[in-house]
């Protein structure tokens, strides 16, 4: 098994209001078959043995679907491999002797909780403002009552794959959450079930997004480039059109 | 031992009447709570997976005041999100002969006749409504060109009844439940408290009336009171350290409830999934599942020779052992999960395993690629081959995959009656956290079905039965029982932080995992289980005298979080072993080496073991007490599962 000797530069910050700094740690004899987070586990075990508090970072499913891991690795959200969360990245993508910089998501609406962990509650609040179809349990018609063309359903699924990790925000110079919001708005707007609330939904979610302090989209496509689910930025244009239509209707008193 | 070992402690409250009428009759006769009165009742739900999220949304829609907790930073991250394959429902959209009865029968049989008929029938009855509900929420299920819903087949069934959304069915259903719940958060009827862990359940006059929690970001210990408590905290597969579960999955909520008197049912029933990516080193933090569907086209084999060193491509056909095809000619590579897993272990135990660790078998697509072409295989399994390559660096189109079984799902859980209430009044348990529907083995695509059934369509009815009778007895967090529970929680945290020994929490967890895997894993025997029961107390003692937890309580402290969970796993492991020791038969996922047929197949012993084991806590360092709920089968007749 090949072993790597690396140097890590890691953001350490004790609490939300404490001052943070980059600290340097050796990461010696790391098996290249380990995942990036397992590399951090190994470093943490050694830190604890030395009596240093381990590096705090979020992780849960470790298979790329829960969306909790959130590391900026060498300046790129989720690291160098495309279509991959940090937890799916493996050490064989690094070379012996590499210096690796690890930072948390950095954007104002995602305050740092500790070290590499940030608070993404703002995304949940955007969801609570309209990311749903208002249907009570038990009030649903038969699943096959409304046929949905396969292409449309597949496109909705492309958007629905969003794991809510926030990499799109972390990668954007404007800290925009447009890709996240557009993915949910588009998924539901594409389906007949979501049509009834289409206008209200887009207005409400975009307004909440603005209220949380996320910036606007200026077409840099950094979000699409780092999205672990490779969600297309074309959903943002789709949302912008929906938003424009809904705003006009609202102005005309048609909502 | 006999079937009528029940001592009257366990009342399953199964309604009378024929199995297909019980649920309808029950619903027609239960006490209801006036809509205007519902807002006077408060409900605590712990966990936001399929079961917890669905229950929170539905109960809030009904008008109850709901307070929900999860340890993750967002309720959308609960591990239901990782389920791949699909969800079963008796829709019969394929016109292939499916029905409520058939789904019920398949589930009871798949569970090796160790589940409750009445619960499983109810599950089958509500299964169709789940699909309707999810479609209405905007879940983008796979569809045909005509616009109708698509189905696929899954293990243990002869009909095509599985609904799916690519390989991310769990994610989509989970986000459906999450968005329904977030709608209620927006409406102010659900109070959502993330990054908070339940550390104690509070009983007042014997009823569950609240919980003690720790805010994982600030360390604040809080008291929460309600009229009833619902645990939707998932399974305990992480007792083994390595499993397909998320890193944070734990037994703490259900184990704390157990220590307060709730019975733990069938803890030894743990499902080992046959197709996972093998362990690559001792740094490994979790195991990744590869969908079972791969076995439709992949052939499983190992070299015939012990100690084979050649690369797989250089091993000639006549020196390969396609052991599943050899042993189970009629099912071949599609033999059920428990049987496939055990067979892989057998060949590896014989020294014929492959890969650096020797704990792996080949899953080979060469024949399928020759027969169907690489394009077809890529269409069918492309995303799985990609996942495999990300993790192992190997291209499975040119070299065979290596797979090995891994702990996946736990059929055991807190004992509940027909109302999904534990033996502690007011403590409800739903989803994987309870024991109720899967018996000794769960069929593929049934976990999602059960989680959502409990949350959307069962608990919202059954919880009213308790509230109508006992909801008026309000308690406040000033009650001395809250004071006591909070003090206990604080003392425990203080203790963990003050030991300052020399071993990390993870090192203990790994050692526990090895112990349970070796002695209470894919196959068990009396001697091994007794060895585990001797070793576990020593390990626990060492933990409490030599663990090193740095940092403080008043800050985000992941070592402290893990330490509390591992401390509970260390005690819980013993109950698993006691249960496995008591059950001297083999059934489903539980294989006792002493109970096998001359051909080496599992031997169920219905005369002696047709019961649910419910274990009661009796105090520190005192073995748990077994209660038995006899299982009665009226609608189906227990038969031997044969896959030869």
Image: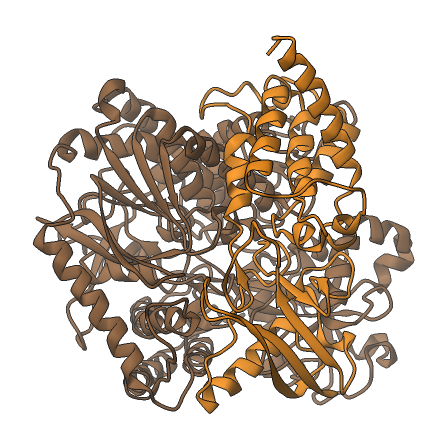
In percent of the image, x 40 and y 51: which residue is there?
B70
**Could you tell me which quadrant the N terminus of chain B lies in?**
bottom left
| Color style of the picture | by chain
Quarter location, residue A142: top right
**Could you tell me which quadrant the C terminus of chain B lies in?**
bottom right
* Residue A56 locus on image (x, y percent): 50, 70
Residue B508 against residue B1 in the figure, above or below: below
In percent of the image, x 12 and y 42: which residue is there?
B475
* Residue B245 locus on image (x, y percent): 51, 61
Number of numbered tags placed on the structure image: 0
Is residue B604 left or right of A211 when viewed as pictured? Answer: left
* Residue B473 locus on image (x, y percent): 11, 36
Q: Colour of chain A?
A: orange
Quarter location, residue A158: top right
Residue B519 against residue A135 in the figure, above or below: below
Camera-side residue of B424 and A202: A202
Residue B34 visible in the picture: no
In percent of the image, x 43 and y 77: which residue is there?
B509
* Residue A72 locus on image (x, y percent): 67, 64
Camera-side residue of A245 and A60: A245
Chain letter tied to brown:
B
């Amino acid at each position: 098994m090949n072993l790597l000797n690396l140097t890590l530069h890691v953001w350490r910050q004790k609490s939300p209001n404490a001052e943070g700094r980059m600290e340097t740690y050796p990461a010696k004899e790391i098996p290249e078959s380990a995942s990036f987070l397992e590399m951090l586990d190994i470093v943490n075990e050694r830190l604890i043995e030395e009596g240093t508090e381990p590096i705090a970072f979020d992780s849960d499913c470790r298979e790329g679907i829960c969306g909790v891991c959130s590391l900026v690795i060498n300046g790129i959200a989720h690291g160098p491999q495309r279509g991959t969360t940090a937890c799916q990245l493996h050490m064989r993508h690094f070379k012996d002797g590499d210096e690796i910089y690890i930072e948390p998501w950095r954007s104002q609406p995602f305050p740092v909780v500790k070290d590499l962990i940030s608070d993404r509650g703002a995304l949940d609040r955007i969801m609570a403002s309209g990311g749903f179809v208002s249907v009570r349990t038990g009030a649903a018609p038969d699943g096959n009552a409304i046929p949905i063309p396969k292409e449309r359903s597949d496109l909705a699924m492309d958007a629905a794959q969003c794991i809510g990790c926030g990499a799109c925000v972390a990668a954007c110079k404007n800290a925009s959450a447009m890709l996240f919001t557009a993915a949910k708005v588009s998924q539901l707007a594409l389906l007949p079930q979501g049509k009834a609330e289409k206008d209200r939904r887009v207005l409400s979610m975009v307004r909440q997004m603005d209220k949380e302090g996320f910036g606007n989209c200026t077409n840099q496509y950094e979000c699409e480039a780092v999205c672990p689910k490779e969600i297309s930025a074309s959903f943002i244009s789709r949302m912008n059109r929906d938003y424009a239509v809904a705003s006009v209707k609202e102005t005309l008193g048609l909502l | 031992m006999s079937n009528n070992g029940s001592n009257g402690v366990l009342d399953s409250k199964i309604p009378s009447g024929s199995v297909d009428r019980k649920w309808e009759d029950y619903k027609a006769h239960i006490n209801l709570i006036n809509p205007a009165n519902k807002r006077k009742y408060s409900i605590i739900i712990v966990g936001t997976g399929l079961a917890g999220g669905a229950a929170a949304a539905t109960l809030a829609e009904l008008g109850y005041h709901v307070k929900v907790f999860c340890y993750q930073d967002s309720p959308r991250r609960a591990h239901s999100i990782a389920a791949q394959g699909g969800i079963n429902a008796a829709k019969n959209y394929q016109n292939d002969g499916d029905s409520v009865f058939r789904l019920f029968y398949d589930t009871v049989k798949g569970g090796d006749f160790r589940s409750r008929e009445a619960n499983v029938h109810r599950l089958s009855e509500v299964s169709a409504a789940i699909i309707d509900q999810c479609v209405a929420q905007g879940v983008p299920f796979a569809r045909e060109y005509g616009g109708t819903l698509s189905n696929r087949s899954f293990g243990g069934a002869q009909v095509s009844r599985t609904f799916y959304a690519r390989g991310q069915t769990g994610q989509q259903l989970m986000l459906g439940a999450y968005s329904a719940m977030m709608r209620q958060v927006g409406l102010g009827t659900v109070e959502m408290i993330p990054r908070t862990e339940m550390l104690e359940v509070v009983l007042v006059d014997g009823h569950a009336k609240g919980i003690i929690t720790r805010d994982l970001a600030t360390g604040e210990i809080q008291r929460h009171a309600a009229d009833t408590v619902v645990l939707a905290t998932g399974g305990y597969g992480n007792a083994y350290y390595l499993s397909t579960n998320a890193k944070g999955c734990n037994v703490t909520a259900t184990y704390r409830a157990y220590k307060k008197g709730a019975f733990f049912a069938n803890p030894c029933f743990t499902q080992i999934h046959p197709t996972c990516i093998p362990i690559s080193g001792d740094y490994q933090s979790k195991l990744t599942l590869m969908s079972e569907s791969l076995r439709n086209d992949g052939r499983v084999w190992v070299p015939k020779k012990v100690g084979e060193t050649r690369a797989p491509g250089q091993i000639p056909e006549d020196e390969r052992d396609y052991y599943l095809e050899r042993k189970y000619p009629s099912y071949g590579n599609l033999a059920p999960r428990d049987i496939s897993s055990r067979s892989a272990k057998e060949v590896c135990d014989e020294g014929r395993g492959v890969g650096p660790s020797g704990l792996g078998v080949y899953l080979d697509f060469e024949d399928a690629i020759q027969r169907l072409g690489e394009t077809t295989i890529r269409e069918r399994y492309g995303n799985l081959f990609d996942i495999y390559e990300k993790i192992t660096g190997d291209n499975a189109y040119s070299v065979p995959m290596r797979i090995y079984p891994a702990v996946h799902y736990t059929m055991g859980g807190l004992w509940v009656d027909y109302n999904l209430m534990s033996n502690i009044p007011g403590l409800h348990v739903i989803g994987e956290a309870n024991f109720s529907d899967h018996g000794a083995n769960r069929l593929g695509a049934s976990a999602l079905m059960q989680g959502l059934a409990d949350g959307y369509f069962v608990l919202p009815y059954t919880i009213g039965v308790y509230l109508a009778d006992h909801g008026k007895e309000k308690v406040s967090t000033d009650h001395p029982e809250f004071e006591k529970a909070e003090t206990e929680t604080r003392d425990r945290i203080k203790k963990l932080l003050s030991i300052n020994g020399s071993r990390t929490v993870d090192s203990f967890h790994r050692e526990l995992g090895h112990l349970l895997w070796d002695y209470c894993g894919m196959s068990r025997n009396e001697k091994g289980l007794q060895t585990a029961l001797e070793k576990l107390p020593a390990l626990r003692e060492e933990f409490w005298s030599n663990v090193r937890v740095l940092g403080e309580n008043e800050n985000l402290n992941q070592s402290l979080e893990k330490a509390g969970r591992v401390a509970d796993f260390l005690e819980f492991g013993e109950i698993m072993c006691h249960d496995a020791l008591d059950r001297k038969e083999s059934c489903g996922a539980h294989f006792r080496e002493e109970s096998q047929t001359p051909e080496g197949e599992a031997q169920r012993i219905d005369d002696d073991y047709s019961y649910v084991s419910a274990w009661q806590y009796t105090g520190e360092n005192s073995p748990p007490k077994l209660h038995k709920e006899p299982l009665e089968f009226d609608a189906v007749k227990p038969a031997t599962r044969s896959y030869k």
